[in-house]
């Protein structure tokens, strides 16, 4: 992937268009991240960031909780997807 990106960048630089050359320099600065994104099946940190936001919201809601084990349990509870009951579809099971 990296050699293809480098080959394209060389072709784009040969055009001598200033805006294209600026884009090429941006691509070269971020080449490692772009190649990793393509190599590892479009893996991003968005899931981790969403989890961090959820933990932060839980921390704000749980002001005054001193039991760290209970707090860890609540974090684990956040990571389990909600499942609805077959008998009562409007009731969410945890």
Image (spheres, rainbow, N blue to C red):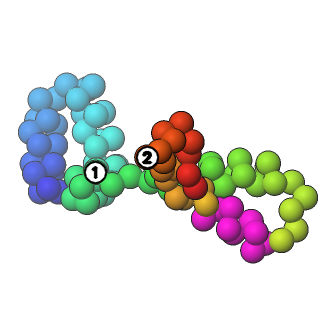
What type of secondary structure mainly makes up the magenta span?
helix
**Residue at (57%, 42%) from the top-left corner?**
91
Q: Compared with residue 50, is residue 40 higher up or lower down, i.e. above or below?
A: below
Q: Quadrant of residue 39?
A: bottom left
The span picked out in magenta is: 68-76
Element on which disc 1 rests: loop
Marked residue nearer the N-terminal end (1 or 2): 1
The disc label shown at residue 42, or none: 1
Image x and y of residue 43, in percent? 33, 55
Image x and y of residue 78, in percent? 60, 56
Image x and y of residue 76, in percent? 60, 65
3 in the magenta segment: no
Residue 49 visible, this angle: no
In the orientation shown, which residue stands out farthest toward the front? 87
Q: Nearer the viewer, residue 56 or 80?
A: 80
72 in the magenta segment: yes
Element on which disc 2 rests: loop
Q: Nearer the viewer, residue 88 or 1?
A: 88
**60 left or right of 53?**
right
Q: Quadrant of residue 8?
A: top left
**92 left or right of 29?**
right
How crowded is the residue under tag 1: few (<14 C-alpha within 10 Å), some, or many (20+)? few
Q: Which residue is mark 2?
A: 86
């Amino acid at each position: 992937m990296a050699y293809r990106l480098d080959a394209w960048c060389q072709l784009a630089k040969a055009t001598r268009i200033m805006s294209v050359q600026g884009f090429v320099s941006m691509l070269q600065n971020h080449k490692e991240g772009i190649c990793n994104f393509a190599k590892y099946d479009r893996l991003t940190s968005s899931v981790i960031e969403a989890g961090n936001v959820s933990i932060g919201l839980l921390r704000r809601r749980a002001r005054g909780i001193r039991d760290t084990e209970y707090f860890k349990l609540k974090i684990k509870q956040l990571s389990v997807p909600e499942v609805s009951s077959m008998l009562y579809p409007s009731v969410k099971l945890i």
